[in-house]
Image: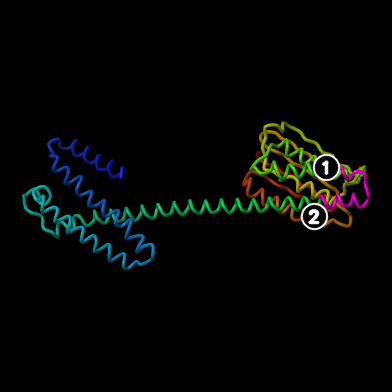
Amino acid sequence: MFVWMGIISFLIFLARLNDAHISNKQLAIVLVLYPAINISLFYLNYLLYIPQFLNKKKYAIYFIIIILTIIAYGIIKYAVGLLFEDIVLRGMKKEVISFTTYFFRTFFMSLIFVFLSTVFKFSVDWFLNERIQRDLENQRLIAELAFLKSQINPHFLFNSLNSIYSLAYQRSETTPEAILKLSEIMRYMLYECNDNKVDLDKELQYLQNYIDLQKIRFGSKAFIDFKVDGNITDQKIEPLLLIAFIENAFKHGVANDINSPIKLLINVAGGKLHFYIQNKKHNNNRDAVGGIGLINVQRRLDLLYPNRYSLKIRDEEYTYTCELSIDL
């Protein structure tokens, strides 16, 4: 509505500028009344004809109705012209313009308003559909992320309970300490990982707790070289992204070889996190790498850090290496 008022006001301004003697009656008829008739044709097509016929692919009916409507509007415009004959229907020679001549003069103007309303309608519908599709895609991604995240806890708990079971089966004195570590880990997973992002230092402490739990499991025979460089304070990261790589190293790698420890390096610099882990592979288990954990984390990276991460995995004969870089 404000757009139309602005256009009409601009036309009145131009008319006044070109002819200061133009009467208010002439302005009202030529620049207000007739534009109002054309605007009504615009909305008739926009609100009624397109939804009822064109959108429902009733093309023939739509075409016929548009032609009949334009003819009807031509008659209406001519009838209004007869009421203001001196202003509308008399030319320079003071002769009354015939209906046929006047109709063809106004036909293309009516056609322009029909065309504009059609373009506007399809543009609005396109933008609305795009927004709906984006909303649906966002909802799908949220649901998928929630599902992927829900897989982490059971997967991690399953592996950890297996480790604690081994300790209990061996009647190890470190079983209570392992249970305590597991409770700290589960507390973090249950109560501090509900936000989209968590503090990086807390996430790294969670990784340290997991490593400590594995050291308890292996006893003095667990060897891991874990180093963190850079400023990890005031940094955020999506939770539970890195644990799968470490789980994979302990599950499928050799952790009890002092000459080939699991190497884990995390470096934070320039707004990027660089994660590096390498483990020696079991001689009888060289092909058993990866699993649901790494598949899960790769999918989460695709969803959470699109075009903002790089992941390189080298599965060699004796070693398995993962290098991950993320824009924090």
Magenta residue span: 160-176
Image height of 56 relative to 1, above or below: below
Left or right, 214 with respect to 197, comes to right
Quarter-of-image position of residue 58 = bottom left
Image height of 131 relative to 6, above or below: below
Q: Which mark is residue 4?
A: none
Left or right, 68 with respect to 239, comes to left
Dot 1: within a 10 Å radius of its alpha carbon, few (fewer than 14), some, or many (20 or more) residues? few
Q: Which mark is residue 289?
A: 2
User: Is the N terminus in the top left, top right, bottom left or bottom right quadrant?
Assistant: top left
**CA gap, disc 2 and disc 1:** 29 Å
Task: List x then y, in percent, for residue 6.
Answer: 28, 41
- Which amino acid type is shown beneath numbered disc 1? Leu
Q: Which residue ends up furthest to the left in the rendered image?
A: 94
Majority secondary structure in the magenta region: helix
Q: Looking at this view, is 33 or 63 the one in front?
A: 33
Residue that numbered label 1 is attached to = 180
| Secondary structure type for disc 2 | loop
Q: Looking at this view, is 206 or 133 the one in front?
A: 206
Quarter-of-image position of residue 61 = bottom left
Image point (44%, 52%), residue name:
128
Image point (56%, 52%), residue name:
139
Task: List x then y, in percent, for residue 146.
Answer: 64, 51
- Which amino acid type is shown beneath numbered disc 2? Val
Image point (35%, 63%), residue name:
52
